[in-house]
Every structure is written in C-alpha cells, then in structure tokens.
Image (cartoon, helix red, strand yellow):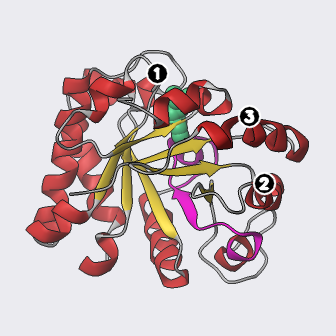
Amino acid sequence: MRKPIIAGNWKMNKTAEEAKTLIDMLKDKINTDKVEVVVCPTFTSLTTVVKELEGSNIGVGAQNMHWADCGAYTGEISAQMLLEAGAKYVIIGHSERREYFNETDETVNNKLIKAIAEGLVPIVCVGESLEQREADIQEKVVTEQVVAAFKNVEAKDAQNTVVAYEPIWAIGTGKTATSQQAEEVCGWVRETIEKLYDAETAQKARIQYGGSVNASNVDELMGMENIDGALVGGASLKEDFVSIVNFGS
Ligand SMILES: O=C[C@H](O)COP(=O)(O)O
C-alpha cells in the first residue's frame, strides 16, 4: 500500500518571516500519521522553515535544483546546497520552469539523476497544455515526458520517485481536472512506468495530481486508484492546506 504524499509548492511567495508565520499557523494542525506531508518554500526561506519544523514529521523540499555540483550557472542552486539548507525533497520540471526558464525533458532527466544520486526525494512534474488537451494528445505528451524523465534511472530509484501530473490548464486557474481526467492520466503514468521497468516498480512509485487542488475536491481526487497524493500551489499558502492534508477526516 502506497503512503499518500501531499506537497505544498509555495512558488515565489513568502519571505522568511512570512514563512515562519505560515508554518506556525499550520504545523500543529497537520496530521502526518496517514499522509507524508511536504512544504516547498523558496530557497531563501528553506532554513527558516526547516528550523520551524524541527521535531515535526513535516518534510521540507525545494522547488528546483541544478544538476551540476558547482560552476558558472548564475542564480542556480546545487543539490548539495539544498541538502545543506535542510531540504529532503526537490520538485523537478515544474511546468512554470519549463515555460519560463527553458526547462526541457533533457534537463529534467539530468536533474532527476542528480537528485537521486544526492539522496533527495524527487517530485517530477509532467502535464499537457490546454492546446494539447484540446488536440486530445495528452496521453502522448505525458507518456513522452515520463519516458524522457526516467532515462537511465534504475528501477529501485524510480520506485522512490514521485511523479506529479499537473495539467497546465488547471494550474492556478481554479479549473481543476475532473477526478476521472486526473485518474486517467495518472493511470497512463503508472502504465508507462510499468513498461519502462516492471509491475513492482509501477506499484511502488507514487503519483500526485496537481492543478487547483482544494479542500472541496481533495477527497474525491484521493479516492482514485492511481492518485497517491497532490502537489498543491495556491491553497498551500493558507489554512486550507490543513484541510487538504487531513483529507477524509
Ligand atoms: O505546483 C503546484 C501546481 O502548480 C498547482 O498550483 P495550484 O494549486 O495553484 O493550481
């Protein structure tokens, strides 16, 4: 049985002081007995959030990383720097990085391999655009993204990798995919992992849905066979996140 994992992607929000206030408001209300919970602040707030969550079971992640150990990559951050700051998870290939910062399937693969090598838990994002959904090629798009992301990744490492299916047309729009749409694509993701590796790997890998998840739709989404969690944006910046991670209660 896969343990559900719900992560909050804060994106470019919350100064370190604001992050402390949010964590102080959330941490004692979140139940981690049945759900693995992760918060992903900006890098500048990482150490503050890690300190505020000391003694809790809530994990801390980063929103991105570079695959190099060091070098002339202005503005980038290495896996070692994330680990030093206390991150245990890292989001890779978010659609906003693919759109605004030229993230490609190749860079996503480079980052996934490096995250695994350094012992970070990767959350790899895939998902189609509105145009691709309207053209009904979402299965092709997502399948290709998954295949490219896992190139040269061993089965044991794929089993510990989280894949987040985030239809771009549902991100930040309030237009959530229906549970049936989300389940269909997450099922394709799992089938693709099985074809790449084996049934055991496909069953152990966890798949999140992301895209306007909120307290009113999380229960139905989490009831889907191939949805093991959620990657939450806007709703993770407020008390709604408590209702989301405590889903079903
Ligand atoms: O990483 C989170 C996703 O981009 C979803 O964001 P959202 O919940 O604001 O739609």
What residue is drawn where x is 50% and y is 42%?
95
175 in the magenta segment = no
What residue is drawn where x is 68% and y is 75%?
83
Q: CA distance from mark 1 to mark 3?
A: 17 Å
Q: CA distance from mark 2 to mark 1?
A: 24 Å
**Circle 1 sits on which residue?**
215
Q: Residue 75: image x %, image y %?
A: 80, 62
Q: Residue 98: image x %, image y %?
A: 53, 47
Vertical placement of 120 versus 234: above or below? Answer: below
Considering the numbered disc 1 on the image, is that residue within a helix, a strand or a loop? loop
What residue is drawn where x is 59% and y is 47%?
97
Vertical placement of 212 versus 126: above or below? Answer: above
Quadrant of the rendering where the N terminus is positioned: bottom left
Is the Cβ of the residue at disc 2 closer than 8 Å to that at disc 1? no
Q: Residue 188: image x %, image y %?
A: 16, 46
Q: CA distance from mark 3 to mark 2?
A: 11 Å
Q: Is residue 10 visible?
A: no
Vertical placement of 210 versus 136: above or below? Answer: below
Q: Is residue 230 visible?
A: yes
Q: Which one is closest to the eye, mark 1 or mark 3?
A: 3
Q: Nearer the viewer, residue 158 or 147?
A: 158
**Circle 2 sits on which residue?**
52
84 in the magenta segment = yes
Q: Residue 61: image x %, image y %?
A: 61, 58
User: Is 79 on the left-hand or right-hand side of 226?
Assistant: right
Considering the numbered disc 2 on the image, is that residue within a helix, a strand or a loop? helix
Q: Amino acid at mark 1?
A: Ala
Q: Amino acid at mark 3?
A: Met
Q: Amino acid at mark 2?
A: Glu
**Circle 3 sits on which residue?**
25
Magenta-drawn segment: 83-103
Q: Nearer the viewer, residue 139 or 32?
A: 32
